[in-house]
Amino acid sequence: MKSKLATTIKLLNKTEKEAYKTLTISLFAISFLSIFALRPSLQVITNYRRKLEEAIKVDQILTTKIKNLEKARQNLNIYEAEIKLLNEALPPRSDQSDLLKSLSFLAATSRITVLKSEFALSEDKKPIENIVISLDIKGSIENIYTFLQKTEEEKRYIRINSVIIQKTQGSTDLAIAKISAEVFYTNQDER
């Protein structure tokens, strides 16, 4: 019996030695693999993860900037339309011929006659200049009122300072009106 027990113990010792040997080689292989193969792979994965997080932050920042630029473009479109209207109301330079054409058109559509028109430019060099206009017009009182109304509705800003209406002798409907007005423009050529 001793021999069976001794043989079994020898076998166990031999098996344990083999197991320990296998375990030691496996642990060495795992250590070697983790140091030379897994560690660089984990470092690469960590670097890519860090770069991905940075890219996500940059993407969020760029998305916010794109939204802000879209809002700015919408605001710019609104402001461009308003600037166009403002430039029509206050043009960058005085143009008496366009102003005279506009007033003549208003007179024709109001069925009045312009008897006399005088323009006086201001001599000051300010950011906003003005032209003083004196008009003598003839027509029915109703047509004179229509002319004044259309002048106020004109895109070009015309400020009427005074209106003097006198009925003509011998006619109940015809009148002569003396109008004093100002037209403004921005003096951009001087700046």
Image (cartoon, rainbow, N blue to C red):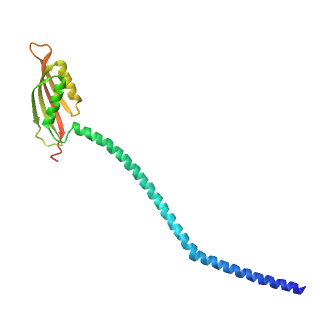
Residue 27 in the image: x percent, y percent? 66, 78
Against 62, is 71 above or below? above
Determine which quarter of the picture holds residue 98: top left
Against 85, is 49 above or below? below
Furthest residue in direction bottom, as rendered: 3
The residue lying at 25 percent from left, 38 percent from top is 86
Marks counted in the figure total 0
Against 39, is 143 above or below? above
The residue lying at 67 percent from left, 78 percent from top is 26
Which quadrant does the N terminus fall into? bottom right
The residue lying at 13 percent from left, 36 percent from top is 97
Residue 126 in the image: x percent, y percent? 16, 42
Residue 38 in the image: x percent, y percent? 58, 73
Left or right, residue 86 beside residue 139: right
The residue lying at 53 percent from left, 67 percent from top is 45
Against 170, is 27 above or below? below
Determine which quarter of the picture holds residue 173: top left
Furthest residue in direction right, as rendered: 1
Left or right, residue 161 beside residue 36: left
Residue 50 in the image: x percent, y percent? 50, 64
